[in-house]
Amino acid sequence: MITFDLTGKVAVVTGASSGLGQQFARALSEQGCDVAILARRKERLEEFSKELKQNGHDCLPVSCDVTDEESIKNAVNAVVNHFGKIDILVNNAGVVEYSSGLHDHTTAQWDKVLDTDLKGVFLMAREVSTIMMKQKYGRIINISSVGGIQAGPSQVSYFAAKGGVVNLTKAMAGDLAPYGILVNAIA
């Protein structure tokens, strides 16, 4: 495994109560990073934080709904109050809604996915980047999907949201580069 030293860095990982979010948080912690893990299910975060603390680095579980601006502001404030800074943001929180295609995909499904997978990335990055801009340093990693570039059937809203994440990432990269903030997407 390739290793790199993140000692002294603070990372925020959204959607960290399961799946890829846990893997990202685990990898960051194993490389020396203190990690704030965010998700709606705080009880799962608290259990996971026990595992991460075994790496000898701090872990802060914070309840956060990335579709809610106030929840994001409260979560970011909690992280900054605890750690004093945020160096890395992994925008991972996401959902998918399946249907048989365009005509079977409901407005409720569309709204749920776009609010979480695209709007949530925007809201979280906007809030965290204000901290990073003051620091003149930051790394934002937005989790997209191959489906954001090469869409297929049955996941209309997911593919639209992830395509939006690709272009949002490009726009954010240009806006934030003068502040020493690198923005990338992983598909």
Image: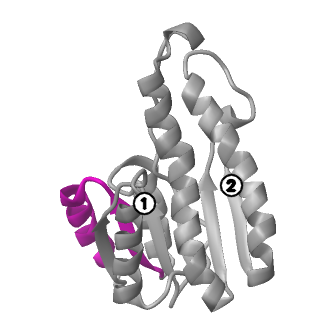
Q: Is residue 144 magenta?
A: no
Q: Residue 38 carries which label?
A: none
Disc 2 marks which amino acid? Ala
Q: Mark 1 points at which residue?
A: 69
Other-residue count near label 1 (Cα within 10 Å), few / some / many at <14 / 14–19 / ≥20: some
Q: Is residue 52 magenta?
A: yes
Tell me where the magenta segment starts and ends, as one range. 33-55
Secondary structure of the residue carrying tag 1 is helix
Q: Name the residue under label 2.
A: 185
Above or below — where is 125 with respect to 97? below
Q: Where is residue 3 in the image (x, y as percent from the top left)?
A: 60, 74
Q: Quadrant of residue 21?
A: bottom left
* Residue 55 visible, this angle: no
Q: Position of residue 16 (x, y in %)?
A: 38, 57
Above or below — where is 65 with respect to 51? above
* Count of all numbered marks drawn on residues in the image: 2
The residue sitting at 34% across, 83% down in the picture is 58
> Foreground residue, 54 or 113?
113
Give whichever of discs 2 and 1 has the lower sequence position: 1
Quadrant position of the N terminus in the picture: bottom right
Asked whether, in this view, residue 44 is left or right of residue 30, the answer is left
Asked whether, in this view, residue 4 is left or right of residue 9, the answer is right
The residue sitting at 73% across, 72% down in the picture is 182
Disc 1 marks which amino acid? Glu
Q: Where is residue 118 in the image (x, y as percent from the top left)?
A: 57, 46
